[in-house]
Amino acid sequence: MISAHYGMSNDFDNLIISLCKFTTLLSTADTPDNLTISFGSNPKAQLAAKTVFNLAHRHGDILREGWKNVLDCMLQLYHCKLLPKVMVEVRPCLHGRICDTNMMPIKISAGHIVIYYTN
């Protein structure tokens, strides 16, 4: 990606926003059932979604305004129950914390928030 390589965040945002429109996930007029069927039967929309998520994963540091569209797509996938189980369920741990063997907690001294990051 030329725009990501040269740090052209406006151009990269426009690319992500355009690709998100091709996913058909941003059409909120459809019910989750209809959206699931239309998305599942449209290979171009699936390829656009895969491309959006791959680009956001690889070049998320360049992305600015486009994050809203990426998260809107993920929210629609959640409402349609199309996200993998790993992304929507967590294991409870001691003291009400969320535990994962790959995550390590970092405590913030200014408040009671605990941030988790993966290695």
Image: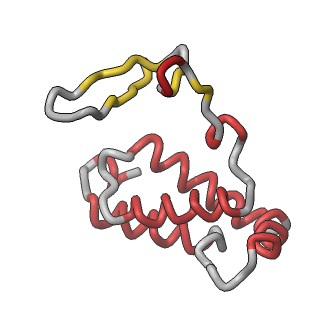
Q: Nearer the viewer, residue 34 or 63?
A: 34
In which image quadrant can residue 68 be found?
A: bottom left
* Residue 60 location (% of width, % of height): 38, 46
Q: Residue at x 65, y 37 (%)?
A: 89
In which image quadrant can residue 39 be found?
A: bottom right
In the displayed structure image, the side of residue 116 where residue 27 appears, left or right: right
* Residue 105 location (% of width, % of height): 36, 20
In which image quadrant can residue 12 be found?
A: bottom left
Q: Nearer the viewer, residue 56 or 115?
A: 115
- Against 23, residue 29 (above or below) is below
* Residue 43 location (% of width, % of height): 78, 63
- Against 69, residue 85 (above or below) is above
Q: Quadrant of the C terminus?
A: top left
* Residue 77 location (% of width, % of height): 66, 59
Q: Residue at x 26, y 24 (%)?
A: 107
In the displayed structure image, the side of residue 9 where residue 25 appears, left or right: right
Q: Residue at x 64, y 70 (%)?
A: 25
- Which residue extends farthest front? 95
- Against 3, residue 97 (above or below) is above
Q: Residue at x 27, y 59 (%)?
A: 9
